[in-house]
Image (cartoon, grey):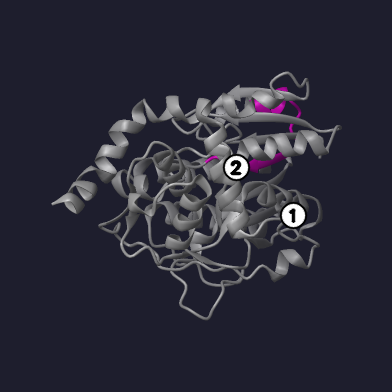
Amino acid sequence: MKNIMVTGGAGFIGSNFVIYILEKYPEYDIIVYDKLTYAGNLENLLEVADDPRYHFVQGDICDAATVDETITRFSIDTIINFAAETHVDRSILAPDAFIQTGVYGTYVLLEAAKNHGLRYHQISTDEVYGHIPAGYSSVETDKLDPRSPYAASKASGDLLVNAYFITYGLPVTITRGSNNIGPFQYPEKVVPLFASNAIDGLPLPVYGDGQQMREYQYVVDHCEAIDLVLHKGVLGEAYNVGTGVEMANMTMVEILLDTLGKSRDLIRHVADRPGHDRRYSLNVDKIKALGWEPRHSSEEAVRKTAVWYQQNEWWWRKIKSGEFKAYYEKQYGERLRATEA
């Protein structure tokens, strides 16, 4: 690998990965290919903006001609696909963009990788496994059982990646990550939303009883795992990436509020979202066998993330003053007003 095309590289996980890779591998060039939708932000990449090994192309992964032109122009040898619509709540409101990007966009990239003879890595999610009953943790060979349009779009992408490996011998790998948190996460997601709301003394809309179980993973730990799978993973295989320890959403909220020195009176229990999975849990033995261990516990990840949002209001304040306001009202307005009745 020398010239790596990182699709969705101006988004949350993608931008953290770009910064990580450029720091670790001085011989690599990174070509960020991003449509710059509402969640794509070039300010996420200010740290590497002047690095001559960093290049940016604005483009849609569904645009085969621009994908092909970028691969040729930069002599790409590897594609890492972070590009996705990622928020479950938005997928319930408007699933079409999720299907277009997650399914058709993945197909376009796989075709390009096949035609140019490239290495391909797909970024996936633990949500492809669906709700996991207590006492069990998902392994990579489990049946995919997605329960939201977002999760279904990601599961479809995984199946396409596997099909291209079996049918065409394309050198592929997949990582399925748990809930990532950390710098530059768009504040529609629960931890940055709650952190920024708490900083402003606004209510925190907790879905249902808040006892949904999640693995909160610090984003740089995930980046290290992707790096390892890229270089040492078995082709054709998927790898779960998480903390291996789950946490109730209410516990996360309490840790976050305590870290920021804010009152728990800000918590509001609101109507749950449709089809909300109660529990995700990943068995991470397979990637640990490659030599990976998470550096942060879920509690450390929540605390570190909360502090980042406290110290970087310059980044999120302008985001929450734009399109976000209309989305927030549509998603939480009635739910929050119902708690005041």
- Residue 291 percent coordinates (x, y): 81, 62
Could you tell whether 128 is left or right of 264 in the image? right
Q: Are marks 2 and 1 in contact (CB under 8 Å)?
A: no
- The segment highlighted magenta reads 70-83
Q: Front-most of 320 and 115?
A: 320
Structural crowding at the residue carrying mark 2, measured as other residues with C-alpha within 10 Å and reported as few (<14), some (14–19) or many (≥20)? many
Provide the residue designation for mark 2: 13
Could you tell whether 233 is left or right of 322 in the image? right
At 79% from the left and 63% from the top, the residue drawn is 290
Q: Which badge, 2 or 1, is on the more N-terminal residue?
A: 2
Image quadrant containing the N terminus: top right
Question: Of the numbered discs in the image, which one, if any, rests on residue 229?
Answer: 1
**As drawn, 69 above or below 235:** above
Q: Front-most of 333 and 15?
A: 333
Give the foreground label among 2 and 1. 2
Q: Residue furthest left?
A: 341
- Residue 209 percent coordinates (x, y): 33, 65
Structural crowding at the residue carrying mark 1, measured as other residues with C-alpha within 10 Å and reported as few (<14), some (14–19) or many (≥20)? many
- Residue 163 percent coordinates (x, y): 59, 58
- Dot 1 lies on which element? helix
Q: Front-most of 156 and 282?
A: 282
Q: Residue furthest bottom?
A: 135
